[in-house]
Image (cartoon, helix red, strand yellow):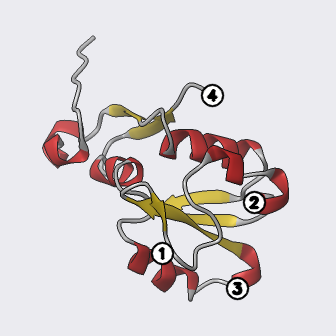
Amino acid sequence: MRVDVFFGPHEVMSSEVANRVVAVVDVLRASTSIAVALANGARAVIPLGSSEEVVSRAKSLARSEVKLAGERKMQPIPGFDMGNSPLEFTREAVEGKTVLMSTTNGTAAVLAVQGARDVVVASYVN
């Protein structure tokens, strides 16, 4: 078995992940928030590259069906429903909702490995 480790999304080349199984580990925030959201009944968590992309994607969905989440440099994004703390992704907040999320590092890492055969978002809670 071959295991390659990358310490940030900027290190990943698409050719290095193509047709491979990739685990994205961002254990402190984004991956834990994603796992908690899904465990609490979120329909889906869609990682996006910027807060502008989150707002744009949200316009194509019914506002009652979507939650906007994310942070930039550890600060919640103004106007979003939640930041990037797993404590915010309660069942009451996310059950049945699609969560559109953009974070400084975690969602960037997930997006950097598109093209992999399988992507697993790993955290201590899952």
Q: Which residue is mark 4?
A: 125
Q: Quadrant of residue 68?
A: bottom right
Task: Answer with mark 4 or mark 2, whichever residue precedes in sequence.
Answer: 2
Rounded to the nearest angstrom, the CA distance separating label 2 from label 1 is: 16 Å
Rounded to the nearest angstrom, the CA distance separating label 3 from label 2 is: 14 Å
Rounded to the nearest angstrom, the CA distance separating label 4 from label 1 is: 25 Å
Q: Residue at x 42, y 37 (%)?
A: 26
Task: Answer with mark 3 or mark 1, whichever residue precedes in sequence.
Answer: 1
Q: Which residue is mark 3?
A: 62
**Front residue of 75 and 5:** 75
The crowding category of the residue bearing disc 3, from other C-alpha atoms within 10 Å (few below 14, some 14 to 19, many at least 20), is few
Q: Which residue is mark 2?
A: 94
Residue 69 vs 116, above or below: the answer is below
Under tag 2, what secondary structure?
helix
Q: Quadrant of residue 86?
A: top right
Residue 77 at what x, y percent from top left? 49, 70
Q: Amino acid at mark 4?
A: Val
Under tag 3, what secondary structure?
loop
Q: Do the numbered discs 3 and 2 sit on residues whose CB atoms are within 8 Å?
A: no
Task: Answer with mark 2 or mark 1, whichever residue precedes in sequence.
Answer: 1
Q: Amino acid at mark 2?
A: Val
Residue 73 vs 77, above or below: the answer is above
Q: Residue at x 23, y 33 (%)?
A: 7
Q: Which residue is mark 1?
A: 54
Rounded to the nearest angstrom, the CA distance separating label 3 from label 1 is: 13 Å
Q: Residue at x 70, y 84 (%)?
A: 63
